[in-house]
Amino acid sequence: MNAYVVGFLVMLVTSAVAVGGMLIVRRIVGVEKLKSFNEVAGNSFQVVGTFYAVLLGLIVVDAMTDMSDLRNTIEQEANAVADVYILSRGLPEPQQTKVRELTSGYVETVIEDEWPAMKQGKVSTKAIVQVNELWDTIIDFKPTADDQKDIRQMCLDRVSELGDSRRSRLITSSHGVSTELWTVLIIGGILTLGFSYFLGLSSLIGQALMTVVIASTLALNVYLVFLFGYPLSGAYCVEPEGFIVDRIIFKLRGRGSGALPNSKTIDPKELLRTRGKL
């Protein structure tokens, strides 16, 4: 389901429940009695609401930062793989073919096997084997010319970056919003919203609108924590776009310059949409 639709439903359901609770409190306590709480309750609500808003804002920002860092890590890993593939052109046979097979195979494994596995908190053992073989292939290669020495060193640097980025990706993707944090968020939201019930307005519509605004704001921010707190699941999950671009690059380079489009410019989004045809 679309993230906007889910967000709207979350906001709608939360607002309906909140207004229902407000109506029950007004009926049980009485509007006049609630009005007598306004001065004290209003000041207290500012304190409670501010503390919860700060907490919620920090959690949302932290979740968004983690997802942004994960995207950057994935891009770095994909760039490192592409660099090794391209640099392998300077290696002699059979190392050149071996490195190309391992890098292209690694990209396919990450897209087809490891990404679905990561959504379940698992890792592809095939990808681990391919990275280890890539290390062994480059380390065991003994260059006989100066240019080969430079290529080998650059390949080692890129494989090292690949390994570092891969470990960061796996560690970051395994993190999520803890049960304790969810408990604090939910209980804090309920208490903050419930505290607003101690405010009484003569206008029922006015108080209902105020309750809807508070409930909607809290619900949408908690929904943002859910979206950004689990980067590999949900409607706003991270996709292996960098590796998909690598796959396209490898296929284009494997076919030669004749595989490139005739136009002077290429739309990357169009390449992604047509990746199955390349």
Image (tube, rainbow, N blue to C red):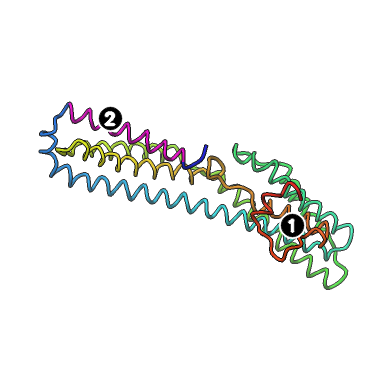
Q: Secondary structure at mark 2?
A: helix
The picture places residue 209, in percent across and down from the top left corner, at 26, 40
Q: Is residue 11 magenta?
A: yes
Q: Is residue 126 left or right of residue 19?
A: right
Q: Is residue 33 above or below residue 109?
A: above
Q: CA distance from mark 2 to mark 1?
A: 57 Å
Say what amino acid the circle numbered 1 marks.
Ile
Residue at horizontal 82 percent and vertical 63 percent from the top: 89
Sort mark 1 into few (<14), some (14-19) or many (20+) by Cα contacts within 10 Å.
Answer: some
The picture places residue 39, in percent across and down from the top left corner, at 13, 44
Q: Secondary structure at mark 1?
A: helix
Q: Is residue 103 left or right of residue 38?
A: right
Q: Is residue 7 above or below residue 98?
A: above
Residue at horizontal 23 percent and vertical 39 percent from the top: 196
**Residue, disc 2:** 20
Magenta part of the protein: which range? 5-27
**Residue, disc 1:** 249
Asked whether the beta carbons under mark 2 and mark 1 sit within 8 Å of each other, the answer is no
Between 107 and 158, the one lying in front of the other is: 107
